[in-house]
């Protein structure tokens, strides 16, 4: 069967673009059987049709930066690599159509030549358009512009059964979370590049102080593009605000916030080193907390008490969405107890907690976030 399957995949994708999996072709520690690299949406659909006919388990892969997020597969017959689904077209108006395998950085570089950008900044290095949308991966700019899903007007995808489909959602939000298949292209809104950008930062040591600084920044009606926090488990952290726009406006708004935050405020033309980066690696157990910004301190303190020590927090303080890294060496049972304890605190506050990343051996024992949980 393996030879006939490989021959069929080569017929669809072309010589050199279907092969037996190598040791690096893994998802959640599970090695795949084969890798197929279709060049068109039609070829992607044909690949999935073949997989459905033969009862194969399939995972899509873009840049691979988030391939181990979520529930590890029980088995993995085929990885559909989107690397050849690459390029951008119809991008001279208010939107751009971008193939799913296109790196976000490549799309941004091309748009910058015309003075525009996608208002997205996914933290994963090498993130592709499809990978970003599959888990709605938001960065700091989501504070002002919304999540990538909220900025997407339409997606094209190969459905698990092999059909080529488009999805138009209400209010520019196609139902990406409900798609069962492989994204092949997306139509995203495009924004002008700002003339000026300025970051203002203040040192902070406690979640309560974070909430106070965020409240002060929001109260000034400064139209910030992002309000982020980095709070290590030990030592001082930072609250940072990004202001964008024409030079005069940015200068005036920055002066206003600096006056409110006081003389300890620093200003710079580039973000801090941690800006737009996750605080975790694949070896960490990481949870995502989503709650109203004013309730973040209560949740952070509850998490500290449950873990027996302060935990590192980083993310969009202005939106109330942060990632927290749990202490090393926890058992699956203990992680479950911590999550359940935080859920009790969140229950009355309308928030939620999900486990987004864990080492493969542990992830198989945990209730991990599904893609739909990240929207």
Image (spheres, grey):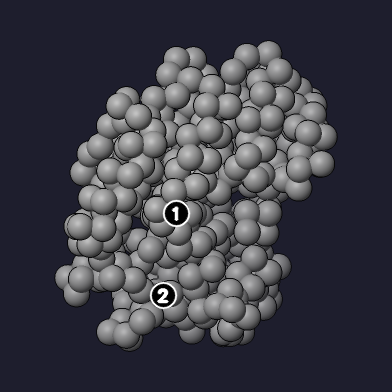
Q: Which residue is mark 2?
A: 189
Tell me the SS state at disc 1: loop
Name the secondary structure under disc 2: strand
Mark 1 and mark 2: Cα distance apart in space: 24 Å
Q: Which residue is mark 1?
A: 221
For label 2, the crowd category at 10 Å Cα-Cα, with few meaning under 14, some 14 to 19 and many 20 or more, is: many
Name the image quarter holding residue 144.
bottom left
Residue 259 placement (x, y as % from top left): 33, 36
Badge 1: residue crowd in 10 Å (few <14, some 14–19, many ≥20): few
Q: What residue appears at the point 39 percent right and 36 percent down from the top-left corner?
A: 260
**In the figure, is residue 85 to the left or right of 165?**
left
The disc, 1 or 2, on the residue closer to the chain's N-terminal end is 2
Tell me what residue is drawn at x 76 percent, y 47 percent.
350
- Is residue 326 among what the camera can see? yes
Q: Residue 68's mark?
A: none
The answer to whether residue 278 is above or below residue 244 is: above
Q: Could you tell me residue 78's position as x and y percent? A: 56, 60
Name the residue: 69% across, 30% down: 298
């Amino acid at each position: 069967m393996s030879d006939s399957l490989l021959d069929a995949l080569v017929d669809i994708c072309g010589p050199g673009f279907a092969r037996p999996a190598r040791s690096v072709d893994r998802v959640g520690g599970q090695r795949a059987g084969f890798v197929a690299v279709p060049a068109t949406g039609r070829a992607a659909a044909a690949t999935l049709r073949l997989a459905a006919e033969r009862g194969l388990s399939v995972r899509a892969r873009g840049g691979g930066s988030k391939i181990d997020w979520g529930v590890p597969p029980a088995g993995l017959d085929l990885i559909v690599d989107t690397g050849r689904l690459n390029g951008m077209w119809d991008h001279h108006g208010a939107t751009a159509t971008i193939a799913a395998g296109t790196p976000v950085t490549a799309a941004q570089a091309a748009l910058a030549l015309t003075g525009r950008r996608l208002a997205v900044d996914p933290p994963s290095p090498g993130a592709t358009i499809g990978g970003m949308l599959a888990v709605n991966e938001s960065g700091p700019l989501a504070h002002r512009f919304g999540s990538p899903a909220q900025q997407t007007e339409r997606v094209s995808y190969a459905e698990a059964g092999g059909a080529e489909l488009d999805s138009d959602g209400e209010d520019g939000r196609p139902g990406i979370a409900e798609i069962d298949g492989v994204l092949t292209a997306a139509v995203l809104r495009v924004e002008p590049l700002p003339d000026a950008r300025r970051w203002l930062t203040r040192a902070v040591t406690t979640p309560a102080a974070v909430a106070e600084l965020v409240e002060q920044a929001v109260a000034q009606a400064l139209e910030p593009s992002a309000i982020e926090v980095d709070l290590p488990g030990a030592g001082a952290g930072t609250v940072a605000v990004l202001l964008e726009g024409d030079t005069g406006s940015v200068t005036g708004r920055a002066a206003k916030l600096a006056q409110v935050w006081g003389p300890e405020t620093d200003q710079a033309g580039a973000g801090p080193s941690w800006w737009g980066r996750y605080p975790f690696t694949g070896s960490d157990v990481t949870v995502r907390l989503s709650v109203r910004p004013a309730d973040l301190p209560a949740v952070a303190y509850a998490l500290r008490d449950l873990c027996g020590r302060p935990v590192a927090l980083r993310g969009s303080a202005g939106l109330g969405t942060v990632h927290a890294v749990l202490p090393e060496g926890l058992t699956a049972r203990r992680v479950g107890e911590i999550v359940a304890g935080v859920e009790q605190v969140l229950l009355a506050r309308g928030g939620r907690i999900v486990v987004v990343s864990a080492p493969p051996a542990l992830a198989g024992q945990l209730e991990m976030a599904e893609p739909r949980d990240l929207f």
